[in-house]
Structure formats: C-alpha cells, structure tokens
Amino acid sequence: MNYLKMLGFAVLYVVTVFATAFLGYLSPFAWVFFPVIAALLGSFSYYLLAERWRRFGVETLLSFLLAGFLLITGECNPPKASLILLAGVIADMIRLFLEEHVLKGMSLAYPILSIGVIAWILPLWTRTEWYYQGAAEELGIDYAKGLMMFASHWGLLLVALTTAIAGFVGIQFAAKIFK
C-alpha cells in the first residue's frame, strides 16, 4: 500500500467537500444542497481510497479528518463534528459487514458518509431562527428568506435523500471510470 497516495486521497476528499460549500454564496438553494454536490464530487477520492483500503477505517478516517478540519477552521462545533464522525463510523460498519462485496459495500457506505456532511448545516433545521438571523446579517434578508424555504422537516428529508442518492450514483460512476 502506498500510504502517501492514500493520505492524498483522504485530503482531497476533505478539500472537495469543503470547497463545494462555497457554492452556497451563489444562492440559498446552493447552500442547502451543497452536500449533494459534495457527495458527487467526493465520490472519486473516496472510491480511490476505499478500493485500496478494504478494511475498517476509511469512512471513519474521512469523517474524522473532515470534522477535525471544520473544528479547526471554526466552521462547526463539537456536537456537529460528533455527528459527522458518527456517520463515518456507521458507514465503516456497513462496508465492513459487506466486505466480500466491495462495490456493494462502498455503494451503501458512502451515501451514509455523505449524509454526515449535512451536520455542518444542521442548525438550519434545529436552530432555525438563529440561523435566519445569522444569514440575514452575513448575506442579506433575501438570502435568509430563501433559506427558510428549506427550513422544514421536509426540507431536511429532501436534502438527506438527494445527498444519499448522489452518493450512490457518484460511487457507481467512479467505479465505471476507474475500473
């Protein structure tokens, strides 16, 4: 195993997820649904890492690195970081359980890892008024009102489902490209 290359794929995953969040400056829709784009684009580095490291730890490592990076940069707090890490551990257990079916394991684990990214913006659904005020101060009233279109349980469900689907599709696409 080339550990330096594997570390590179892990760092690339974190950079990809973080960079897609900048799409949120385009519109409230882009902010709420950036986890979908992150799931699609992050699938390539995830696949390349998971294909080489077939034992427990890939998803946990990626979620740990992402949560740690978000904590260090002040983008999230320990409870949100814990949710990101929890998603990674659950995804790792799924992949470990299906280890003899490599692509199937990745196809089911990666969407769970991808859903963990939603913890970063979870306050939109858990602390809606606070989130609205912060968005209004930072990006304006119209932007904050746009976020409120998605601030229901249905909005959270929609983001989670589309993120999981994007993760699944991303892995299938990555597998076709790299096989």
Image (cartoon, rainbow, N blue to C red):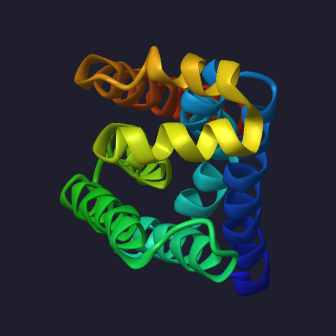
- Picture residue at 66% right of the left edge, 69% below the top: 10
The picture places residue 140, in percent across and down from the top left corner, at 73, 31
| Left or right of 43 on screen, residue 83 | left
x, y percent for residue 12: 76, 61
83 is higher (above) or lower (below) than 25: below
Residue sticking out furthest to the left: 97
Q: How many marks?
A: 0
109 shown above or below 136: below
Picture residue at 53% right of the left edge, 60% below the top:
50
Give the quadrant of the C terminus.
Answer: top right
Q: Residue at x 76, y 60 (%)?
A: 15
Residue 51 in view, yes or no: yes
Give coordinates of residue 106: x percent, y percent. 41, 46
> Nearest the camera: 144 or 88?
144
Relative side of 136 to 163, left or right: right
Which image quarter: residue 87? bottom left
